[in-house]
Image (cartoon, rainbow, N blue to C red):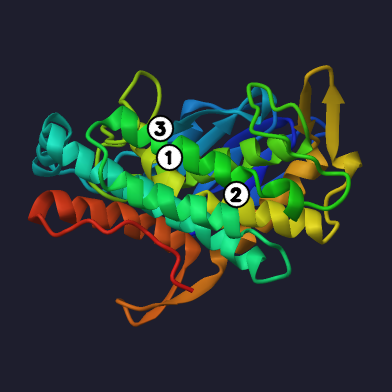
Amino acid sequence: MNDNYHIFSDGRVERHNDTVRLITEDDEKKYLPIENAEALFLHGQIDFNTRLISFLDDHGVAMHVFGWNDYYAGSVMPERGQTSGQTVVKQVRAYDDPDHRLDIATEFVSGSIHNMRANVAYYDNRGFDFAEALGDLGHRREEISSVDAIDEAMGVEAGARRAYYATFDEILPDGFVFNGRKYNPPNNKVNSLISFGNSLVYASVVSAIRATALDPTISYLHEPGERRYSLALDIADLFKPLLTDRVLFRLVNRGQLSADDFDTELNSCLLTESGRKTYSKEFEKTLEETIEHPNLNRKVSYQYLLRLEAYKLKKHLLTGEAYEPFERWW
């Protein structure tokens, strides 16, 4: 079970016999094989009913909904395949223990910085001179080991991300200017790609956490809040450089996205349906890529790495085994 289906058309999605059917506004009917589905991603204006929800629940398929400005709006999650009161108790106790929470939070930041630095090093070895950014990121990673509070850890992460983003304008081709992170709404093509990509990473991590008995609302780096799965925010930060940013660089440097793939208005820039389809296709292709795992001694997909991260955290909470965040090793 690892296929994701992205629906961009407006219309209605419903159960039809033993499968899922999309009926577009033009009355075109499309059928989605659900047997191996991980999740549905709804990007268009789509109606659905409780009969569909029950059917997806029976098959353990999540449904992620994206709203205005491509923002993640929420998920309809199937009943958990795994439940464990012991896991939730351990998860809460770790959150309530300031030292334990800080240890986990700093591991998330350390792993995130490593993966940002890996991207910068990749381009540094391809003709760019990013010695200063590499040094800054290395310094930030050393700094995270000595912070005393969560807000300090967040500050180190923010500083590392500024150093990382400062390399983007040199990596990106003509016509794509970043000039710093802006969102709500994104103000240019690069920011719209980052926002859309980060939303896909977040939703994919939500699906991955669902496969475990972890509660997605109890987190360590990001503060738990209302109406969000803050643990998904913690884990997603590890994978944004590998997924969001590498997909972005690949698409724009190969010329697979152009100005025609964006709708630009005053102070906002959003991907068109065509642009979202192009990005989502490359994103899913990346999730299916495999890599030899040094500890498992077999190839695993990038998508499985998301689930593996949730399992590692669960194991740490239950057994006390050291949590080592995902760090790109290849």
Let me know if residue 33 appears in the view. Answer: no
**Front in this rendered view, residue 176 or 81:** 176
Where does label 1 land, which residue? 157
Which residue: 69% across, 48% down? 168
Most extreme residue toward the bottom is: 297
Alpha-carbon span between mark 2 and mark 1: 17 Å
Where does label 3 land, which residue? 155
Q: Residue 96 at what x, y percent from top left?
A: 13, 29
Q: Amino acid at mark 1?
A: Glu
Q: Amino acid at mark 2?
A: Thr
* SS category of the residue bearing label 2: helix
Q: Residue 53 at what x, y percent from top left?
A: 46, 34
Which residue: 64% across, 45% down? 6
Tag of residue 244? 2
Image position of 295 with respect to 181: above or below:
below
Alpha-carbon span between mark 1 and mark 3: 5 Å
